[in-house]
Amino acid sequence: MSMMISDPVVSRHTDAQGREVINLRGREAACDVGNTEGKFILGPEKRSIVIPNVVCEMQFQDVLEREQSVLEALRVKIDSPALKRKWGTMAVGVLAARQRNRKEIPFGSVKAEEDQAVILLLTGLAVDAVHAFPVRDGICHATYCISTGLPISEYRDKELKKEFRKKLTGGVHTVKFLETAEPHNGVEVRITIFDAKIISEGQAAHLELTTDEYGRYKPMPKTDGTYLIFDDGGGTLDVAVMLEGGKPDNERSEGYDAGINQILDRINKEIYDRFKETFESRKKLSEHILKSRQKDPVRIAPFLVRGKGQDIQDIVDRHMRTYAEQVYRVMAEKWREVSGCQAAYFVGGASAIIRPYLAELNGGEGEDGEYVIHFVEPGKSFWALANAYYKIGRAHRANNKKRKIVLLPPA
């Protein structure tokens, strides 16, 4: 006998402004589905989840011992109208990164059309749902209002954006957890995305840097006029041109297919060609570089090959300098295009990786260099988009001209 499903909509009415007001039992979710990893901020308590953006279709034999954390053992089967094809059983995230036939999002792919982006988003929501919604007879019904983003080039395509939103909100998505840690083991999560707010990634980076936790405007340090924000990620480089008062220049803001993933792939390939071993994912390589920087801003720590440290400094330097030169050219061209520009701010994981190379090309940071450039602190940069989506999602549900959504705790 199937169990009764209660309607998550508790009530509806029209307010004094003529808006429909919906009281909904559900959760808010800010989803930064990056090409390297997914970062999620969920619920009023702002629960955070990070999952590497790696998947691997595979069969699972008897698991010798269950992992203690579900994030280390994401064995799932996903059935969703948002997917272009049927997928088999999959490892996602940390577990997938250890497999030889792992799949990372290829450079140049369109995020709004990429199955892997949907898989990562739904997996993150399902991980949260088992803790936040009731589980009865192994079934968990979860309702979410999400906020997420697309690169500027995709966001400007109104039809593409519309179709992306439609496939997220257009049905029930099922994520079945296979052999994994409790309490997720064996649970089937049925996800309904009631509302989806889509924003451009470049605009989101700007909003996070220039608003407080309540969404009130705060100018970037030492700027009272025009400046640039470079959101340098895995798949794209988004450039936001900001005018006086924090207003974005929509015409001159643009996105470039110049993310760092292609460089990380080249480094990994050259490391493998030299040592016949390599990092298991782009994320692992990025972490190695950034951890090295914490000890020495220039030197890259040795890569362990059969227990012995091997020098990869020349490989990393050569490829990263080439990529930094590409980003620097984009910055110089944009600076010439935007008159009266006061500064450029770099945010995003790639910016932290290429920081010393950009600073070297520029002859220094801040007012010491040829251009006035600043780098956002890595911890803040890492969560910048997810934090922005969280603020934007709340403002969207409360201030939308057509309807207001009031989220109530799940029953």
Image: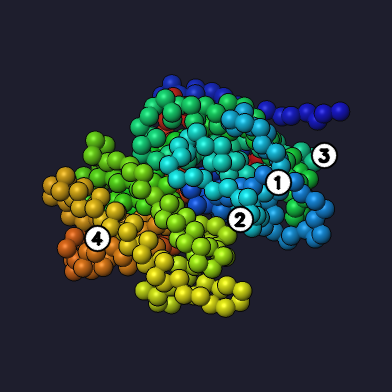
At 57% from the left and 72% from the top, the residue drawn is 305
Please state which of the two labelled residues, at mark 3 or mark 1, is closer to the viewer: 1
Amino acid type, label 2: Ala
Callout 4 amino acid: Ile
Question: Residue 89 in the image: x percent, y percent?
Answer: 71, 42
Q: Height in image: 342 above or below 120? A: below
Question: Does the CB distance between marks 3 and 4 fall below 8 Å?
Answer: no
Ranked by sequence position, the earlier of labels 3 and 2 is 2
* Residue kind at label 3, given as amino acid type: Asp
* Quadrant placement of the N terminus: top right
**Colour scheme of this structure image?**
rainbow
Residue bearing the label numbered 2 = 97
Residue receiving disc 3: 137
Q: Residue at x 69, y 59 (%)?
A: 69
> Alpha carbon of mark 2 to alpha carbon of mark 4: how far?
35 Å
- Residue 373, numbered circle: 4
Q: Considering the numbered disc 3 on the image, is that residue within a helix, a strand or a loop? A: loop
Q: Secondary structure at mark 4?
A: strand
| Mark 3 and mark 1: Cα distance apart in space | 27 Å
Residue 204 appears in the rendering: no
Give whichever of discs 2 and 4 has the lower sequence position. 2
Q: Earlier in the sequence, mark 3 or mark 1?
A: 1
Observer-side mark, 1 or 4, equals 1
> Is 210 or 204 nearer to us in this picture?
204
Q: Which residue is mark 1?
A: 58
